[in-house]
Image: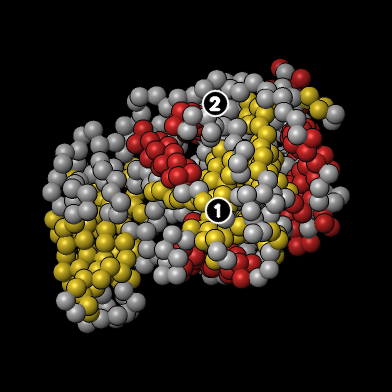
Amino acid sequence: MSGAGLRAGWAKTDITGEPWGVGLMGYGMPGQRGRGLLTRQWARAFVVATSSHRVAFVVADIGMFFQAAVDEITDRLATATGGRLSAENVVLTATHTHCGPGGHGRHRLYNITTLGHHRRTFHRLVDGVVRAVLDAEAALAPADLSLARGELHDASVNRSASSFDRNPDRDRLPGRIDPTVTLLRIERDGELRAAIDWFAVHCTSMGNGNRLISSDNKGRAASAWEAQERDRVPDFMSAFAQTNAGDMSPNLGGSAGHGPTDDERDNTAEIARRQLEAARVLAAGPGRSLAPIVDHRLTYVDFGAAHTVSGPTGRAVLGAAFAAGTSDGLGATVFQQGLGNRVGAISRALYRRDPVLAAQQAPKEMLLPVGTVGWVQERLPVQLIRLGELHLLCLPMEVTVTAGARLRDAVAAAAGIDAGDVLVQGYANGYGHYLTTPEEYDAQRYEAGATVFGRNQLAAVSETASRLAADLAAGRTSEPGTPPARQRAGRFGSPSGSTVLSRPRPVRVAAVRTPEPGGRLTVDFDCPHPNRVIPDSYARVERRDGDRWVPIADDDSPSTEISWERRGSAFTARVAVDLGGRAGLYRVGYAEAVPGRYTWALVRVD
């Protein structure tokens, strides 16, 4: 057997956070607080093992993992597995959707727009990820793993083209994008049972005006592939992971919500479809079998005080260009991308007061010294995972495509392998903002303004990655570095979106609106606070077929959406479903407090 000696297991768990009143994490817009649900959030976990080593790899439909959740998850896994799984060999990655509830971290910067830490959302994430990993490990069984590679040229665009063009090695990426698609295929008895797809594109198809939870394009692609395979392989699971997507936008039209169409939901579906189509082509074609080798290395680096051959890094500072936002989501209008912001006077004052920091951060127009005030994590993990010939450089940063290409070269040179066997896995195990090349940094567009440790940050990451790669290739241990102090979630959270003042209420049908031909059916339910209990599904839609009710949709289906309105302590849920113009007898249900029970509205559609 081509993958003899390898075992694999996989599992997914619902991690949907509080859908009402919590600030959505990603765009940092104070008014973008959840009011409903387009799709649920999932953690998809894969465990790959040999007789001596194993690795857990998680793809979660969230904006990013923060240290508090990483610490809690890895500590609990280490305890539950007797140390078989820990921070050393667990990779926690995010799809980077910008439309999931935030407040699942403890660093102050990230909780400003979420109005604090949200305990229920935190525990939904932590509990779900731990359960998914443990279930995946319990499902370990012999498997064949293989890699297939292709390209996708019409699902991303460089949102900082002028910065990209400053790179002397820009010709290595024609079109200013990284078109590479990598598919890890997991097979049993010659049948595809699970897959992980890597492609560089932001999950910003849904804009910063959206207030419904959405897993965006990558989550949509994963759910669509699983739905397509459900009849053939009921436990088929797919994940669409990120890589060096720092400057890669799905908004092909050049502004938020503009791409193949001018509708953000249609664009989300289309970018998802294009990624899925590319993955399915690779799933059906030839691939390279992976050797039965699993290995890993991990170190922690204080990026606020690293020394490199190019010079030192500096304490974390966000620049004025960061506050301007990007074409995917504009920020404060008083700022602009690039140099020449009005904040220049403040920045010059900071430069005069701290010439060392000035040298480390120049030419950034400094706005927020978030490192010195302890608002962000500065001691961050760098991890290298080996699965057969595939090497994953796992970084807690948003890496631009050119920075990613240089890092792949560095790892390949140190390990004595081909750069094609290296992937940069961004958004992993924490969050340290962006990583640009020095040339891109000098332009000080959004991505550079958010490269918080200064112009030499790429050098620090590259040198660390090279050390890990050399150690892994030589079979020696790596210097672990000093991890940050463990960060716990705390007992109390923000009252925003809380259920403190809400009472249990019965669910009752309030209104039914039958659709015009081709329209949507909507049913209103009076209901309890939606954050009080987060059920497996808030809503179900069923169609009468003979003498039985056949489920056709739930709150994770592309055809449904739920939004809530609040009047004092009372809530009304509006469940909308696109029936595709199909007549029949339907019932729409809303979840009661008892798991698995629904209050139903019976509707005949002509």
Position of 370 with respect to 566 (left or right) is right
Label 2: state its secondary structure.
Answer: loop
Label 1: state its secondary structure.
Answer: strand
Instruction: Judge the density around disc 1: few (<14), some (14-19), many (≥20) Cα neighbours within 10 Å.
Output: many
Q: Is residue 432 above or below residue 246?
A: above
Position of 532 with respect to 427 (left or right) is left
Residue at figure coordinates x 39%, y 53% from the top left: 40
Colour approach in the figure: secondary structure
Residue at figure coordinates x 41%, y 63% from the top left: 234
- Which quadrant would the C terminus be assigned to in this image? bottom left
- Which quadrant would the N terminus be assigned to in this image? bottom right
Could you tell me if residue 180 is visible in this image?
yes
Q: Tell me the mark number nearer the camera, choosing from 2 and 1.
A: 1
> x, y (%) of residue 359?
79, 25
Asked which quadrant contains residue 598, the reply is: bottom left
> Can you identify the residue that label 1 sits on?
142
What amino acid is found at the position of numbered circle 2 in the picture?
Trp
Could you tell me if residue 202 is visible in this image?
no
What amino acid is found at the position of numbered circle 1 in the picture?
Pro
Given residues 350 and 18, the one toward you in this image is 18
> x, y (%) of residue 148?
68, 62
Position of 110 with respect to 505 (left or right) is right
Using the numbered discs, state the Cα–Cα distance from disc 2 to disc 1 in whole angstroms. 45 Å
> Can you identify the residue that label 2 sits on?
375
